[in-house]
Image (cartoon, rainbow, N blue to C red):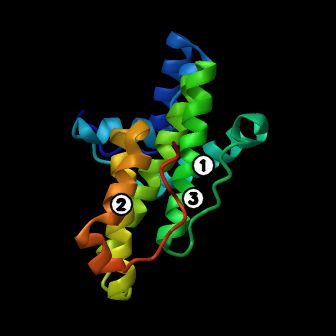
Amino acid sequence: MGRPGVGELQLQKFQSAICESFGEGAVESPATIARLLADEGAELRHPEVIEFDARWRQAQIKTNPKRFRGLKVEPVVKPLRLRQAENFIKRLERLRERSERSGDKADWQRARDQAIKAREIAESRSKDRTLDQVIRTEQAEIAEWLGVWLQTPKLFAEWLELRRRSGEFRERFGDADFGVRQQT
């Protein structure tokens, strides 16, 4: 793109152009736009992008709180544990299903954005040598869960059930029951 880096100003311009061309409902989050630009080789000014994305999301929640009723996502301060990650993915799945029923693609994109952000956090924490090895192993597992949900959300519950029955999972995490069973 030949420019020094992508930050808030550039992302605002992309959002405005999307809104003008396709309408308000097509406007993507700053993080989503930044991710697409980074995939095309753009250099991101990460702190600026993250701060802008957080402010934009808060504004979205304030202007349309009903849309976010099914997904109450708190800022992640501590690493999620397996049970917390499972509950988080359940909330994402409810939002995805609601979006599918209503035909509101913006809700589905919000669920995806939250999952992508949580996955990035889990991946980062899985590599953080200041954290305990048990936590890093859980974070790697959670990142995998989120990746599977992002790729095949309708199959996630079945996949998770099989994953927890696997010898590798039991060796790493024991035979703990995390409460989610395949509903038949």
In space, the residues marked 2 and 1 are separated at their CA atoms by: 16 Å
Q: Which mark is residue 87?
A: 3
Q: Which mark is residue 143?
A: 2
**Which residue is located at x 54 percent, y 35 percent?**
96
Q: Give the x, y percent position of residue 161.
A: 39, 56
* Residue 53 visible here: yes
Look at label 3 and name its amino acid.
Asn
Report the mark closest to the observer, 2 or 3.
3
- From this view, report whether residue 182 is shown above or below residue 94: below
What is the number of callouts on the image?
3
**Which residue is located at x 60 percent, y 40 percent?**
94
Question: Mark 2 falls on what kind of element?
Answer: helix
| Picture quadrant where residue 20 is located | top right
Q: Residues within 10 Å of mark 2 (few under 14, many from 20)?
A: many
* Residue 45 visible here: no
| Picture quadrant where residue 126 is located | bottom left
Q: Give the x, y percent position of residue 149.
A: 40, 46
Which residue is denoted by mark 1 in the rendering? 91
Question: Toward the viewer: 148 or 33?
Answer: 148
| Picture quadrant where residue 38 is located | top left
